[in-house]
């Protein structure tokens, strides 16, 4: 938010020019200030003003005649977000919402904000994991064999090697017969 005078040499995508609290034309009577405000918006200029006050000002007649050629009410498409998928000259999918005055604009912005916050909260909480009370979770048995000791599994799929290992453990190994006891 800044004043028109501080906008010299700057540009912005959208400019919202608020002239609603003025009771007299005042310093905006200098047409250069209005030209600065009107020429610095790249994508859109929204002027909130008391039209009856400014349209009768002689110095501002050329600028306000251009503004008066456009609709005096704000048409919004709340269901459409940026960047839009529709073509430039095609009409919006839904019916536009028409904003008549500042009170309605304030109510629209507040309601729209609350609606978006609720949508973001519900999307956030729907992706969260469900937590259970400690001790209330029932264990699930694994679908495959899991050994109790990490080294208990055999590293081979060969039945011959498994039989050889089994024989070594049971003492049926022919090599065991050739062993001499250490204390004989």
Image: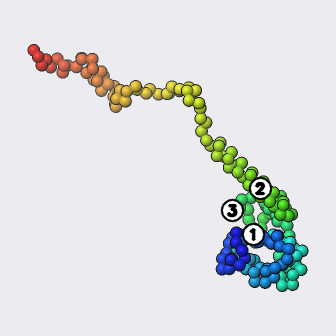
| In the depicted structure, whether residue 55 falls above or below residue 76 | below
Question: In terms of depth relative to the viewer, which is nearer, 93 or 62?
Answer: 62
Q: CA distance from mark 1 to mark 3?
A: 20 Å
Tell me the mark number nearer the camera, choosing from 1 and 3: 1
* Residue contact between numbered discs 3 and 2, judged by CB atoms under 8 Å: no
* Residue contact between numbered discs 2 and 1, judged by CB atoms under 8 Å: no
Give the labeled residue for mark 2.
110
Badge 2 density bin: few <14, some 14–19, many ≥20, Cα 10 Å: few
Which residue is rendered at x = 35% and y = 26% of the image?
A: 152
Residue 71 location in percent, x, y?
A: 85, 70
Which residue is rendered at x = 27% and y = 20% of the image?
A: 169
Give the labeled residue for mark 1.
16
Q: CA distance from mark 2 to mark 1?
A: 17 Å
Give the labeled residue for mark 3.
83
Badge 3 density bin: few <14, some 14–19, many ≥20, Cα 10 Å: few
Q: Secondary structure under badge 3?
A: loop
* Residue contact between numbered discs 1 and 3, judged by CB atoms under 8 Å: no
Residue 38 location in percent, x, y?
A: 75, 77
Q: Secondary structure under badge 2?
A: helix
Using residue 75 as the reference point, say whether residue 2 is left or right of it: left
Q: Is residue 63 visible?
A: no
């Amino acid at each position: 938010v800044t004043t028109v005078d501080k906008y010299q040499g700057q540009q912005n995508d959208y400019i919202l020019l608020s002239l609603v609290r003025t009771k007299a034309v005042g310093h905006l009577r200098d047409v250069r200030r209005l030209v600065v405000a009107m020429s610095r918006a790249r994508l859109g200029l929204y002027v909130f003003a008391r039209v009856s006050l400014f349209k009768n000002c002689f110095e501002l007649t050329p600028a306000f005649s251009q503004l008066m050629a456009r609709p005096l009410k704000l048409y919004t498409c709340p269901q459409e977000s940026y960047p839009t998928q529709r073509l430039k000259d095609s009409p919006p999918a839904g019916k536009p919402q028409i904003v008549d005055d500042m009170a309605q604009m304030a109510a629209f912005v507040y309601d729209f904000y609350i609606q978006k916050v609720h949508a973001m909260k519900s999307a956030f909480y729907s992706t969260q994991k469900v937590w259970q009370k400690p001790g209330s979770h029932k264990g699930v048995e694994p679908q495959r064999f899991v050994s109790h000791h990490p080294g208990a599994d055999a590293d081979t799929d060969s039945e011959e090697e498994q039989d050889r290992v089994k024989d070594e453990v049971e003492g049926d190994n022919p090599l065991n017969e050739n062993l001499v006891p250490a204390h004989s």
